[in-house]
Image (spheres, rainbow, N blue to C red):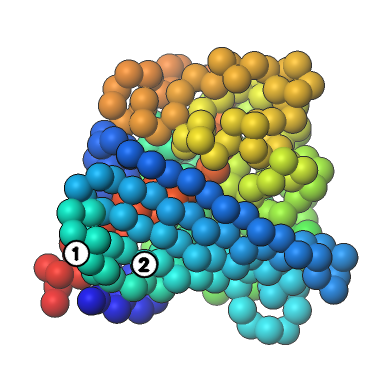
C-alpha cells in the first residue's frame, strides 16, 4: 500500500494537470456517493466539524476522506490549518487498500483545482485582475490555480477581515509576472476584478452583486453549510449560475439554498455543473460581458478523482 505525504501531493498535482484530470473524471460515471457531517460547539462559540466523504466507481476505485474542520486553528497560534484529514483509496475490483494520502494537501489541491476547472469554462480568456477574499490556507492555492488556468492574470488583490493576514499572504506568495497586493477596500477591488474568488467562513454575504463589472467571474468556495453565504442575492440575479455538482450544492449550501428559498432563483436556474460542462452538454461563458457565478461545493467524488490522478502519477515517478 502506498503512503503519499503532503510534499509529494503538492509536487505531483500541478494545477493545469489537475484541471485536465478533473475534466476527464467528470466524463466518467460515479456509482455511489454520500456524505456524513458531524458537528460540535467549540470554545469560541462557533462550530467544529468532522466529515466522512466516500465515493465509489464500481470496478474501478473506492475512496473515503476523513476530514476535520476546526476554524479556530487559523485564528489562534496553533499553526494548524482549518481543514485537516487523511484519504484512503481502495481498488474497486478487489477491495484491496491501495493508498493512504495526506488529506490536508489533497483537499487544498482538489478544492483549488475544482474552482480552476470551473474558471476554465467560465472566466474570460483575457482576465487580468483577480481578487482573493480570504487569506487562510486555501487562499494561496486558489490564487495559484486561477492564475495557472488564466495566465493572463497579472494583478491579484488580497482582502481579509484581519488585514495583517492579507498583507502577509501578499508579501510571501511569489508568482512570476504577477503582482500581489493587500487591500482593505473589498468593494473597490471587486469593482475592478475579472475574477473574484472567496474562501471564507462568512455567515453574511461579503460580495454584492452591484459591485460586479460586466464580464466578471465569481468563484465561491467557502460557505459549505446552509447558514453560510459569501455573495448576496443580487449576485445571483445578475449572473449565469453554475455549480461543481448538484449533489453538494442544491439545498445544502447558503449561496444556492438561500436565493432559492427567497425566490430569487429556482433550482432549474442553475445552468450546469462540471459533469455537463466537461461532457459538452451545456456551454460555459457565452459573451465577454456576461457575469458568471460558480459555486464550489466539494464532495467525495472530487477527492476520488484527484486521488486516482495522484496515485497514477506517484507510480510513474516511483
Q: In this view, does 314 lie to the left or right of 70?
A: left
30 relative position to 170: left or right: left
Instruction: Indicate the position of residue 143 as horizontal and vertical percent values.
Output: 50, 55
Is residue 270 visible in this depiction of the protein? yes
Give the left or right position of residue 65, taking residue 219 as reference: left
Graded by Cα atoms within 10 Å as few (under 14), some (14 to 19) or many (20 or more), the crowding at tag 1 reads some
Q: Which mark is residue 277?
A: none
Q: Is residue 198 visible?
A: no
**Residue depicted at x 58% and y 47%:** 221
Q: Position of residue 127 (x, y in %)?
A: 46, 37
Residue 274 vs 183, above or below: the answer is above
Tag 1 residue? 313
Per the rendering, the mark at residue 88 is: 2
Q: 6 or 51, which lies in front?
A: 51
Is 61 in front, or is 112? 61
Q: What element carries label 1?
A: helix
Question: Residue 11 sits in which quadrant?
Answer: bottom left
- Image quadrant containing the N terminus: bottom left
User: In which quarter of the view is residue 206 placed?
Assistant: top right
Amino acid at each position: 500500500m502506498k503512503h503519499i505525504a503532503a510534499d509529494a501531493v503538492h509536487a505531483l498535482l500541478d494545477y493545469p494537470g489537475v484541471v485536465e484530470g478533473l475534466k476527464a473524471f467528470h466524463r466518467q460515471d460515479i456509482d455511489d456517493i454520500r456524505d456524513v457531517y458531524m458537528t460540535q460547539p467549540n470554545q469560541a462559540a462557533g462550530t467544529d466539524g468532522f466529515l466522512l466523504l466516500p465515493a465509489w466507481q464500481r470496478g474501478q476505485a473506492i475512496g473515503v476522506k476523513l476530514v476535520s474542520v476546526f476554524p479556530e486553528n487559523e485564528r489562534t497560534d496553533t499553526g494548524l490549518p482549518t481543514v485537516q484529514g487523511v484519504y484512503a483509496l481502495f481498488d474497486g475490483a478487489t477491495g484491496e487498500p491501495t493508498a493512504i494520502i495526506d488529506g490536508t494537501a489533497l483537499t487544498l489541491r482538489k478544492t483549488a483545482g475544482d474552482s480552476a476547472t470551473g474558471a476554465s469554462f467560465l472566466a474570460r480568456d483575457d482576465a487580468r485582475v483577480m481578487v482573493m477574499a480570504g487569506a487562510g490556507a486555501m487562499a494561496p492555492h486558489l490564487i495559484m490555480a486561477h492564475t495557472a488556468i488564466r495566465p493572463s492574470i497579472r494583478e491579484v488583490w488580497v482582502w481579509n477581515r484581519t488585514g495583517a493576514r492579507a498583507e502577509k499572504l501578499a508579501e510571501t506568495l511569489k508568482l512570476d509576472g504577477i503582482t500581489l497586493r493587500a487591500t482593505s477596500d473589498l468593494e473597490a477591488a471587486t469593482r475592478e476584478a475579472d475574477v473574484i474568488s472567496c474562501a471564507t467562513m462568512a455567515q453574511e454575504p461579503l460580495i454584492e452583486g452591484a459591485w460586479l463589472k460586466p464580464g466578471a467571474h465569481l468563484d465561491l468556495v467557502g460557505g459549505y453549510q446552509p447558514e453560510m453565504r459569501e455573495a448576496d442575492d443580487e449576485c445571483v440575479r445578475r449572473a449565469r449560475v453554475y455549480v461543481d455538482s448538484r449533489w453538494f450544492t442544491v439545498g445544502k449550501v447558503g449561496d444556492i439554498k438561500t436565493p432559492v428559498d427567497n425566490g430569487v432563483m429556482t433550482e432549474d436556474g442553475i445552468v450546469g455543473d462540471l459533469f455537463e460542462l466537461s461532457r459538452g452538454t451545456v456551454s460555459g461563458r457565452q459573451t465577454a460581458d456576461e457575469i458568471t457565478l460558480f459555486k464550489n461545493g466539494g464532495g467525495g467524488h472530487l477527492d476520488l478523482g484527484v486521488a486516482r490522478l495522484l496515485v497514477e502519477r506517484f507510480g510513474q515517478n516511483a
